[in-house]
Amino acid sequence: MELTPVTDLPEIRPGDDLADLIADRAGDTLADGDVVTVASTVVSKAEGRTADLADYPVSGRAQEIADSLGDLAGEEKDPRFAQAVLEESTELLIEVPFLLTETRFGHICVNAGIDRSNVPGHDLLLLPERPSESAARIREGLTERGYEDVAVIVTDTCGRPFRHGQRGVAIGWDGMPASRDWRGEQDRDGRELGVTVQSVVDELASAANLVTGEGADGVPAAVVNGWEFGDLAGSEELFRSVEDDLIRQALRGWEWG
Ligand code: GDP
Ligand code: MN
Ligand code: MN
Ligand code: MN
């Protein structure tokens, strides 16, 4: 497998056609059957998902959240940012010392994934509304350009519980299953695997983040050549439902401090 950054992409603006821009620059690197990863930051920019703090009149709840975060940090926190996070979310799982929420498309992350880095001219960049649909549109654009069966993964950089450090995850995908199901396969001793479902979209997203970077590199996309999903069964499931998520159930009864 080879992972190649797509270089020379411009600053992405609302209405830009990412499939075209990527295909033009990927050149011979991109072939039928490859996987293309695209950072959610540029998907959001292309979809006009920028926002400004002034767009968010503050509710009582947002003020309350900003006050408790501010008390803790020893400095004022902007309640308009808390309001933006609330509006992008369906559930608030942790309120202090940071906002952990479920976004409208089922992804759980800090601050509803609202980004304040790499957003020229605006205060905020919201995540794409439905990242898997964004991935499908990019894939369709690549098909129109003559590339057959290219899978697309929309990535974001996220923190994780239990471990320091952030890494890339898939927040949307199209053209491949989310996971590869090893259950029923055998290990080297003939023992049957009972639980392993490998989240290949996340693994590819993390690998892509190694070449795209997080700062000023200007490399929001990568091409994965020569990676094969293989013969195992696929699964579309990535985000756990509440019933299926012990950690989330525990958080519902949890208070900080
Ligand atoms: P996120 O992980 O989706 O939040 O995206 P990041 O903010 O970490 O950016 C990922 C990569 O995309 C970094 O290399 C950025 O410099 C780059 N990047 C962000 N916005 C743009 C853009 O509009 N154009 C280009 N060419 N690169 C960008
Ligand atoms: Mn960012
Ligand atoms: Mn981000
Ligand atoms: Mn990133």
Image (cartoon, rainbow, N blue to C red):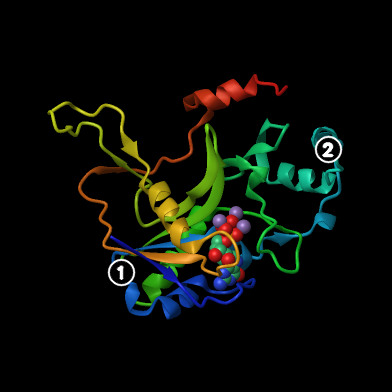
Q: Quick check: 224 above or below 106? A: below
Q: Please identify, in this view, whether the residue under mark 1 or under mark 2 is nearer the observer.
A: 2
Give the image quarter of residue 257. Answer: top right
Q: Residues within 10 Å of mark 2 (few under 14, many from 20)?
A: some
- Element assignment for label 1: loop
- Is the C-beta of the residue carrying label 1 under 8 Å from the nearest atom of ligand 1? no
> Which quadrant is the N terminus positioned in?
bottom left
Residue type at mark 2? Gly
Looking at the image, which is closer to me, 129 or 31?
31
Residue 237, given in percent of the width and then of the height, sits at 41, 40
Say if residue 153 shows up in the picture.
no
Q: Is residue 20 left or right of residue 109?
A: left
Residue 43, given in percent of the width and then of the height, sits at 56, 63
Q: Quick check: 172 above or below 65? A: below
Residue type at mark 1? Glu
Query: For the point 64% across and 73% down, which residue is it?
Result: 13
Q: Quick check: 79 above or below 151? A: above
Query: For the point 60% across and 72% down, which residue is it?
Result: 12
